[in-house]
Image: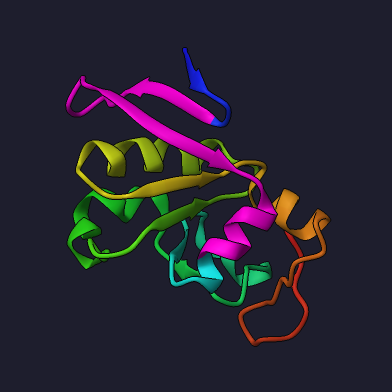
Amino acid sequence: MHGGAGRLNYRDAVTSHPVDVTDIDPAEADRLVAAGALLLDVREDDEWTAGHAPEAVHLPMGQVVDRMGELPTDRTIVCMCRAGGRSQSVAVHLAGSGYDVRNAAGGMQAWAAHGLPVVDAGGAPGRVV
């Protein structure tokens, strides 16, 4: 169910309340991060190690529920995965818990295709797997 351009209305599985999550493109994600948003990469360890956005914080999807208290409540969180599906699920959960959150549509694939930096675990140029 669409709630407007870029906004999708979901039901959060935890709260069963409608939750609005805005899907944003890589340029908007980069702009928000530059303005102080947290870029949260929810991919698995091997995906992160191969390549991630330099500004990102890594928190695998399976650990989000247990570690939600580590996330800031005073700034926007931009969720990122490989293609946008896992991050969308995490974004819906976080939004249902009161976080100001956006989903990076297209994930790291779109980020890299847009020419934004990707680094590996050692800081060298990385790749999206």
Residue 44 within the magenta-colored segment of the rendering: no
Say if residue 129 shows up in the picture: no
Q: Quadrant of residue 67?
A: bottom left
Q: Residue 56, image x and y in percent?
A: 51, 70
What is the count of numbered marks? 0
User: Is 13 part of what is drawn in magenta?
Assistant: yes
| Image vertical order of residue 82 relative to residue 119, above or below | above
Which residue occupies 20% across, 29% down?
A: 14
Q: Is residue 68 left or right of residue 24?
A: left
Task: Measuring from the top left, give residue 36's x and y in whole percent.
Answer: 44, 72
Furthest-top residue in this view? 1
Visual colour scheme: rainbow
Which quadrant is home to the C terminus? bottom right
Give the residue at x 55% y 75%.
55
Q: Residue sitting at 21 percent across and 20 percent down?
A: 16
Residue plotted at (39% across, 57% down) = 77
Residue 59 visible (yes or no): yes
Above or below 122: residue 24? above
Q: In this rendering, would 67 be left or right of 23?
A: left
Q: Which residues are magenta?
A: 7-32
Q: Position of residue 106 (x, y in %)?
A: 67, 42
User: Hey, which quadrant is residue 128 in on the image?
Assistant: bottom right
Horizontal and vertical percent position of residue 35: 49, 71
